[in-house]
Amino acid sequence: MPSRRSLLLGGVALGGAVALLSMRPNKLGAGGHNDYFTNLNNVLRQNGEGRPTMIVDLDALDHNIREVSRALGGRDLRIVAKSVPSTSLIDYISDLSGSNRLMAFHEPFLGAMGNQQFDILFGKPMPVAAAARFYDRPALKRFDPTTQLQWLIDTPERLAQYVSLAQTKNVTMRVNIELDVGLHRGGVHDPAVLQQMLKTIEQTPQLTFNGLMGYDPHVVKMPELIVGQQEEFQQVQQRYQKMLDVALASVAKTNNTNDLTLNAAGSPTYALWGNVDGIANELSVGSGFVKPLDFDLPSLANHRPALYIATPVLKSSAGTWTAGADWVGEAQSLWDPNRARTIFVYGGYWQAKPVSPEGLVTNPLFGRSSNQEMLNASDAVDVNVDDYVFYRPTQSEFVMLQFGEILGVRKGQIEHRWKPFTWA
Ligand SMILES: Cc1ncc(COP(=O)(O)O)c(C=O)c1O
C-alpha cells in the first residue's frame, strides 16, 4: 500500500504536471505591477498608512456616473446607498448625477443619510421593530420622515404591523409596496392582494401610499440556458404593468398619480430599463458606480472597475514553504511556475480576489488568513516588502465598511478621505 506521503506526493505531482501543461508564468510589467497599479503603489508608498486600505479610483467613478446618467434613458436615478456606503461618497455621486434619491437597506444608516437633501426609499422591508426603533430615536434635525422617507411593505401581515405602529406612535408614514416581478425574494404578485393592501392604506389616515418597487437582477444573473433574458425581461415588465394598473385604478380616486415613486432595476438591469417606455419612473443603481467583481456583467460592459483594496507586503521570498511540510511547498513551487514566490500580506481573506501583480493566487494548502494571508506568484513578480498588492472586492456593500477611511485617488493624488457608514 502506498504511504500517506507518497499518496500526497502523487497528488501534488499529478496536479503539478497538469499545471505545467496549462500554465506559463504570467507576463508582468516592472515591479510586478502594470503602469496603473505602479502609480497606485507609489501613491501608497508615499502617503499610505501602512495598512489595508480601500481605494476608489475617482476617474473611473466619474466615468461610471456619467455612463449611468447617459443610460438611464431620461428616468430619475435612485442611488443605492448600501453599495456606496459613505455619506461623502453618496454626496459626491449625488452632486455629479443630480440625483437626490437614495435607497436604504439598514435602519441605523438613516442617521448618516437623513438630511434635507434626500428622499429615501427602503429597498427591503424593515421588521416593524426596526421601524419602531427609528421613531424611538431622537428626531433627525434636518430630515422630515413624513415627506422624505418611504417604508417598503411586502405583505398584508407586515402592513397590519405598520398600521398598528403608526397608530401607537401617532406618526404619519409613507408606504411603498414591494412587487415580486420574478425574483421571488419578496413582495406581492397577486393583484387581489395588492388591491386589499391599497384599501387598508386608504382606510388608515396615518399611512399614505407612495408607490411601487420591483427588483429584477435575475434577468441577467441567471444563466441564459435557464432563463432566456429577453423573454424574462418582457415578463418582468408585464408583471410590473399589471400591478401598476391595479394601483393606478385604486389611487386615481385619492392621490395625484404623478407623484408616485415607481422604482425598478438595479445595476445589472438599469440599462435594459433605459430602453423601455413607461412603467417605472426611476431606476436604482449602486454597485455600478464602483463595479466590484461580481458586476463584471455584459450589461455593465461600459462601466469601469473603481474599487480596490491595497495592502502592504510583509514578506516576499523565493519558493513556497508549507508549515510543517516544506517538501510539499517545494514540490508545489517546482511543478507550478506561478507558485515560485511566496508573499505574505497585511490582512486578507476579504470578499475579494488579488488582481495585481497579475497572477497572484492564494494557497489552498496554507489556507486563507484574515491576519496575514499567503499569496503565491511566479518569479517574474518582484514586489518587495512595503510594496502594496491590490485586490478587487467581489462586492462593495460590506467590504467597504471594513477599512476605515476610503481614499478617493486621482492621477497619483489622494483627493478625498471618506468615512464609511458604521453598522450599528
Ligand atoms: C431592491 C433593490 N434595488 C436595487 C438594488 C441594486 O443595487 P446595486 O445597484 O448595488 O446592485 C438592490 C440590491 O440589492 C436591491 O435589493
Image (cartoon, helix red, strand yellow):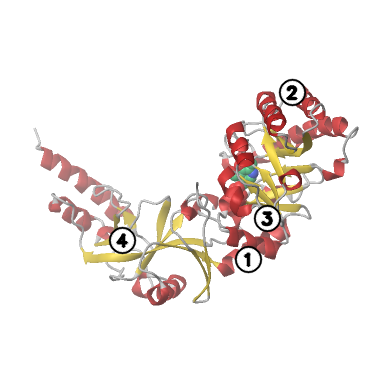
Whether residue 185 is visible here, answered yes or no, is no
Report the side of 351 relative to 85 (left or right): left
Is label 3 in contact with label 4 (beta carbons under 8 Å)?
Answer: no
Mark 1 and 4 residues: CB-CB less than 8 Å, in contact? no
Q: Label 2 amino acid? A: Val
- Tell me: 183 left or right of 260: left
Residue at 81% in and 46% down? 277
The type of residue carrying mark 4 is: Val
Q: What label sits on residue 384 in the rendered view?
A: none
Q: CA distance from mark 1 to mark 3?
A: 27 Å
Q: Give the mark nearest the N terminus, 4 or 2.
A: 2
Q: Earlier in the sequence, mark 2 or mark 1?
A: 1
Cα distance in 3D space between marks 3 and 4: 40 Å
- Residue mark closest to the camera, 1 vs 4: 4
Q: Nearer the viewer, mark 2 or mark 1?
A: 2
Residue with the mark numbered 2: 193
Task: Identify the image quadrant of residue 98.
Answer: bottom right
Point out which mark residue 115 bears. 3
Type of amino acid under label 1: His
Query: Which residue is labeled 4 in the image?
Result: 345
Q: Residue under circle 1?
A: 63
Where on the picture, by quarter, is residue 175?
A: top right
Give residue 240's position: percent from left, percent from top: 75, 35
Spatial separation of the CA atoms under disc 4 and disc 2: 54 Å
Find the distance from the CA under tag 3 to the CA under tag 2: 34 Å
Of mark 1 and mark 4, the one earlier in the sequence is: 1
Q: Earlier in the sequence, mark 3 or mark 2?
A: 3
